[in-house]
Structure formats: C-alpha cells, structure tokens
C-alpha cells in the first residue's frame, strides 16, 4: 500500500513510519517541522519506499499517485509545545484534520486520526473508558489542544457518517521512548535529561498527580492493529500501569543512578489530577495489551538520551 503519515518527523510519526515500511508498504511523510526533527527520519534517507514532503497540513494537501491510507499525526503534542503554538495547534486539529480527511476521501482511502486522552480533560471518572465524555475547560490554556482534538474526532465521525470515509480514531495516552526531543517539556524526557545532566528534577505541584506511561513500540503495535480492524468509534491505547509523578522521579533516579535532587515548581493550570486508560475495548477487539513495563522502557529511553550526549559527557548540552 501507499500510505501517508502526517507528523512523520515527530516522535510517534517517525516510529509509525518505520513500522509501516517494515510491513512492506510505501510511505509519504508530511511535516512542517514545527515540533519535529529531520534527524528522526535521517536513517530513511536512502529508503526508496519513503518520500518526505515539508508542508503545513493546515494548507491543502496534495500527494501524487493513489493513496490507500492516511495516518493523521501532525499536531504539537507536548503541553509546552502547544502552549507555545496555540493557534497552530488549533489549526492542525481543525484545518489539518479537514485536509487529511479530504485527502482520504478523494482517494477512497482509510484514515486513522491520532487523538488523545486529553479529550477526557481533568477526568471525573477513573480509569477512563471510551464512553466517558470528559471534563474539559473549553477556554483554559490547554483548550487549544483538547478542543482541537475533540473537534477533530467530531469531524472524523462526520466524514465517516456523511461521506462514508473509512475512519479510525485512536485516543493515545502518555507515550514515551527514544526520539522525544530533549527539550520537548514532557515529563519523561524532562526527568531523564535532568537526571543525566545532574540537574534537579522539576516536579510540578506536589507530585501526587498520576499518569500511565506506554512505551512507543507497544503503542505502534496497537495503532497498526486498529488500522487493520473494522472499528469506527474511538479506541483508547495506553498502558494502564499508573504512577504518581513523584514515583516516576524516583524510578528515573534509580534507572540513571543520578544523584540529582528534586525541585518543586508550580502546577500548570488545569493539569489533570489523574489519568489511566481503560483498555477493555482494545484488549477485546484488537487482542492488544502493552508488553513493556515502565522499568524496561525507561532503560531504553535513558540509553537513547545517553547516546545523544556529546563527548563532553554528562552536563554537556544535549543537542
Ligand atoms: P511530536 O511533536 O513529536 O510530533 C508531532 C509532529 O507533527 C511534529 O513532527 C511536528 O513538526 C508535526 N506538525 C505539527 N503541526 C504540523 C502542521 N501543521 N503541518 C505539518 N506537520 C505538523 O509529538 P508526538 O508525541 O509524536 O505526537 C504525534 C501525535 O500523537 C499528535 O497528533 C499528538 O496529539 C498525538 N498524541 C501523542 C501522545 C504522546 O504521548 N506522545 C499522546 C496523545 C496523543
Ligand atoms: N510534569 C512535571 N515535571 C515536568 C514535566 C511535567 O511534574 O518537568 C508533570 C505535569 O505537570 C503533569 C505530568 O507531569 O502532571 C505529565 O506531564 P506531561 O507534560 O508529560 O503530559 P500531560 O499528561 O500533562 O499532557
């Protein structure tokens, strides 16, 4: 198949691209590099089945030849990134999703939308099943991401219902692994980079808020299974293992062997108190459960960031 991945130069998009190529398909990666990096795709420079287009998906998308699938992953995803690019984030979720759906419709192809656990906002139901409608502040700073993704889901369902586009929606819970940017601001990359530098780990609030962390290869496996299944309603993918942020900081210190201290910083506005996926649907319909425990995934992530350190060693600037 010839497949399109928007956001291909990002953390998840680049791993997904690798998987699609490994399945024997051709991939056209589209990215405007607002939060992604060419280095995430550098290993594909001589791959004849891969082509890269530097484009903004909020502008109309044209791809030569017939396409059989579109994976719409283009959007800033880290809170630090989407708070820095609020309007671009709303545009990627709204206009970008419209353009990606238009591309799928024109080609009669399938489309998978990368949605998020943030559609549940600061959840009042825990863990979160797909049937929960969420608790989102529609005008708070995080709304640029949450509401863009909620609109993207609504638009995707409308294209499915009105135009018969063969759509999938994945609600991705916190995912981590190699190729995250060291400065992307998410908690795993922040803690690992801080620990390797010997800098204090920055805990926002009292660290009692929880998240559930999925290793990237587990997530990509679930996405590929969902793409190949016949499910149009949203499906949660994430690792149900739930940790407080303070517990995560302890684990990062133990994994890196770092002597870093921790430093308390203010909790961002509307930061969800807790988050964990109910994955009954993915487990029943996709026969999917995550395999990589946090201890193992963290080790691999630490190795990646260690490898990125210049010969100056710990303390030298990471990229
Ligand atoms: P990322 O920032 O590493 O990747 C996003 C990519 O999209 C970047 O390469 C960026 O340059 C590109 N992009 C953004 N706006 C664009 C535009 N207008 N045109 C073209 N390219 C554009 O983030 P990620 O973690 O890889 O997230 C990828 C997708 O998965 C996002 O849609 C995100 O909302 C979703 N998601 C990720 C997580 C996670 O934990 N990683 C969780 C929930 C949802
Ligand atoms: N967080 C933290 N220190 C950091 C970065 C994040 O304590 O350096 C917290 C953040 O406040 C949130 C959790 O870790 O409670 C997860 O944040 P992240 O930005 O990774 O993703 P989110 O789940 O909030 O989208």
Image (cartoon, rainbow, N blue to C red):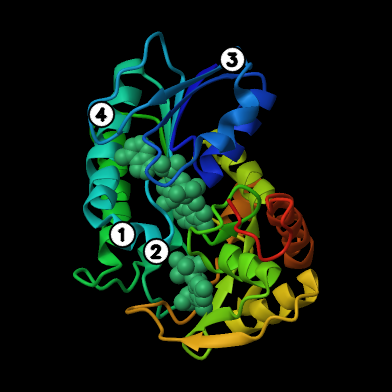
Q: Quadrant of residue 66?
A: top left
Q: Residues within 10 Å of mark 3 (few under 14, many from 20)?
A: few
Is 181 situated left or right of 56 in this image? right
Dot 1, how many residues are within 10 Å of its Cα: few (below 14), some (14-19), or many (20+)? few
Residue 112: quarter of image: top left
Location of residue 221 in the rendering, given as x and y in whole percent from the top left corner: 66, 42
- The dot on residue 80 is 2
Q: Residue furthest left?
A: 139
Question: Looking at the picture, does residue 268 appear above or below residue 231?
Answer: below
Question: In the figure, is residue 210 to the left or right of 305?
Answer: left
Label annotation for residue 280: none
- Residue 222 in view, yes or no: yes
Quarter of the image where one finds residue 133: bottom left
- The kind of secondary structure element at disc 1 is helix
Residues at discs 2 and 1 in contact (Cβ within 8 Å): yes
Which residue bears the numbered disc 1?
84
Looking at marks 3 and 1 on the same chain, the residue that comes earlier in the sequence is marked by 3
Image vertical order of residue 56 relative to residue 253, above or below: above
Of labels 3 and 1, the one closer to you: 1
Q: Nearer the viewer, mark 2 or mark 3?
A: 2
Q: Disc 3 vs disc 4: Cβ atoms closer than 8 Å?
A: no
**Horizontal and vertical percent for residue 31?**
40, 33
């Amino acid at each position: 198949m010839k497949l399109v991945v928007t956001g291909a130069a990002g953390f998840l998009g680049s791993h997904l691209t690798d998987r699609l190529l490994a399945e024997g398909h051709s991939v056209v990666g589209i990215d405007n590099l607002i939060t992604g990096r060419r280095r995430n795709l550098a290993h594909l420079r001589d791959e004849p089945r891969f082509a890269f287009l530097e484009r903004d998906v909020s502008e109309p998308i044209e791809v030569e030849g017939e396409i059989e699938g579109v994976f719409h992953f283009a959007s800033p995803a880290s809170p630090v990134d989407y708070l820095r690019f609020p309007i671009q984030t709303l545009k990627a979720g709204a206009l970008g999703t419209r353009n990606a759906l238009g591309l799928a419709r024109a080609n009669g192809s399938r489309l998978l939308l990368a949605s998020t656990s943030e559609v549940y906002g600061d959840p009042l139901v825990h863990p979160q099943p797909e049937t929960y409608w969420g608790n989102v502040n529609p005008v708070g700073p995080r709304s640029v991401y949450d509401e863009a993704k909620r609109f993207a889901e609504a638009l995707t369902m409308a294209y499915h219902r009105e135009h018969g586009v063969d759509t999938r929606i994945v609600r991705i819970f916190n995912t981590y692994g190699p190729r995250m940017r060291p400065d992307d601001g998410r908690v795993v990359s922040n803690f690992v980079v801080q620990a390797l530098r010997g800098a204090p780990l920055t805990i926002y609030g009292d660290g009692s808020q929880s998240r559930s962390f999925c290793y990237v290869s587990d997530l990509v496996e679930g996405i590929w299974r969902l793409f190949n299944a016949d499910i149009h309603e949203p499906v949660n993918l994430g690792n149900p293992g739930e940790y407080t942020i303070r517990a995560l900081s302890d684990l990062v210190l133990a994994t890196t062997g770092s002597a870093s201290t921790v430093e308390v910083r203010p909790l961002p506005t509307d930061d969800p108190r807790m988050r964990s996926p109910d994955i009954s649907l993915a487990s029943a319909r996709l026969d999917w459960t995550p395999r990589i425990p946090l201890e193992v995934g963290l080790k691999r992530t630490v190795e990646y960031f260690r490898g990125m350190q210049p010969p100056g060693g710990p303390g030298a600037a990471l990229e």
